[in-house]
Amino acid sequence: MEFLSLPQTDLNVSALCLGTADFGAGTSEADSFAMLDAFVEQGGNFLDTAAIYADWTPAGKGSSERLLGKWRASRSPRNIVIASKGAHPELHSMGIGRMTPEEVEGDLNASLSNLGVEAIDLYYLHRDDASIPVYEVLAMLEGFRSAGKLRYYACSNWRPHRIREAQEAAQKMNVAGFVANQPLWSLAKPDLTGGDQTWAIMDDDSLALHREMGLPAIPYSSQANGYFQKIAEARPLHSSIEATYDSELVRPINRARFSRLEILSAQTGLSLTQLVLGWLRGHEFPVVPIIGPRSMAQLQDSLRAADVKLTAEQVSELVVSG
Ligand SMILES: NC(=O)c1ccc[n+]([C@@H]2O[C@H](COP(=O)([O-])OP(=O)(O)OC[C@H]3O[C@@H](n4cnc5c(N)ncnc54)[C@H](OP(=O)(O)O)[C@@H]3O)[C@@H](O)[C@H]2O)c1
C-alpha cells in the first residue's frame, strides 16, 4: 500500500485510513479484530476513532477506543498511527459546544486510558465552538502537546473561515497548528437539510483553502455510505442515505455522477469503489480517505482502491454536472 508523509509531522500514514466507529458496537469484537488484522497485513497503519464512539449504541461511549486498546495490547503492532477525537457535544445537546480546556482534557484523558497509550498520535477537535477565540484553542492544544498527551492535532467539522483563522494564528504563534482537516466528503453531493447541522462538508470555500494551504484532508463518509454501489446493485437505499444523497435537491447531480462513474468504470476496468476513493485521492493536495467497511468483503473491496489515484482530468470529468 502507498504511504504518505503528513506535512509538518513525522507521521507516515497508509493511503487509506480505517474508520472504527462501529467496531465493538455494531461490528463484533471478533469481526473487528479480523478486519484490523487484515488491514495491517495488507500494509494499512492508520486508524480513526473518537471518544464519543459509540455512545449511540448499547456498547456505549468509548467502545471503539477500548476495542482498539485491547487489539493493540494483544497484537503489539508496529508503526500504527492512531487518530482520535474529543470535544464532541453531548448527543442530547448537539448545539452546545464542549471545547473548554477542562472538557477537552477530560476527553483526552479518557481516550488515553481507553487506548492504553501515553500519547495520541493525531488528535482532532471533533467539533468547533466558534465562541472560543482560535488563539485560546491553539494555546490549549499546545499545552496538551507540551504535556506529552498528544503528538499532533487537527480539526474535524470546522468551517473554513475558522480553519483559516486558526492557521493564521498558528503562524503568528510559530506553531504547526492543524496538520489536517476531517470533513464530510465524497463524490456524492450531500443534502444536509434534515441532517446533523454540526457536520461540515467539503464545500467550495474549504476546497479553495485546502488547495491554497496544501492542508491534508482526511474525509469521512468517503463512500457516501455505499450510495453508488447500492444504486449499481439495485439495493434499497436506507432512509438516511436517501435523505442525504438522493433527495430532490441532490438526486439529479448524484445520478448524473453515477452515470459518469459507470462510463469511466467501463473505460478503465476499475470498480465503483476504486473510482470513488481514487477520485478523492486524485486531488492536488494530500487526501487520505477514511473507509468504513461493515464486513471483511467490504474491507477487501475498499483496499483494492489503495493504489488508485484518478488523473486531474478524470477528477473534473466526474463532477462536471455540479
Ligand atoms: N469526524 C466525524 O464527524 C465523522 C463522522 C462519521 C464518520 N467518521 C469516521 O469515518 C468512518 C467511516 O464513516 P462512514 O461509515 O460514514 O463511511 P462510509 O464508508 O461512507 O459508509 C460506510 C457504509 O458504506 C458502505 N460500504 C463501505 N464499504 C463499502 C464497499 N467496499 N462496497 C460497498 N459498500 C460499502 C456500507 O454500507 P452497508 O452497511 O449499507 O452495506 C457501510 O456501512 C467512521 O468509522 C469514523 O471513523 C467521522
Image (cartoon, rainbow, N blue to C red):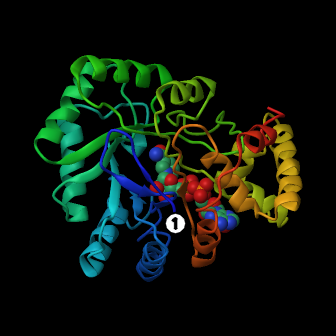
The furthest residue to the left: 147
Q: Position of residue 51 (x, y in %)?
A: 32, 53
Give SS at disc 1: loop
Q: Quadrant of residue 162?
A: top left
Q: Is residue 50 visible?
A: no
Q: Residues within 10 Å of mark 1 (few under 14, many from 20)?
A: some
Please give the residue where the numbered disc 1 appears in the rendered image. Answer: 1
Vertical arrangement, residue 163 with respect to residue 75, above or below:
above
Q: Position of residue 260 (x, y in %)?
A: 86, 48
Vertical arrangement, residue 243 with respect to residue 131, above or below:
below
Q: Quadrant of residue 81?
A: bottom left
Number of marks in the rendered image? 1
Residue at 35 percent of width and 43 percent of height: 124
Residue at 55 percent of width and 29 percent of height: 211
Q: Nearer the viewer, residue 112 or 217?
A: 217
Residue at 45 percent of width and 31 percent of height: 158
Q: Position of residue 141 (x, y in %)?
A: 22, 35
Residue at 39 percent of width and 45 percent of height: 6
- Left or right of 150? Residue 84 is right
Vertical arrangement, residue 292 with respect to residue 94, above or below:
below
Q: Quadrant of the C terminus?
A: top right
Q: Position of residue 178 (x, y in %)?
A: 35, 34
Q: Is mark 1 within 8 Å of ligand 1?
A: no
User: At label 1, which amino acid type do we have?
Assistant: Met
Q: Is residue 43 visible?
A: yes
Q: Quadrant of residue 284?
A: top right
Q: Regarding ligand 1, which quadrant of the image does it lie in?
A: bottom right
- Left or right of 32? Residue 314 is right
Q: Nearer the viewer, residue 90 or 229?
A: 229
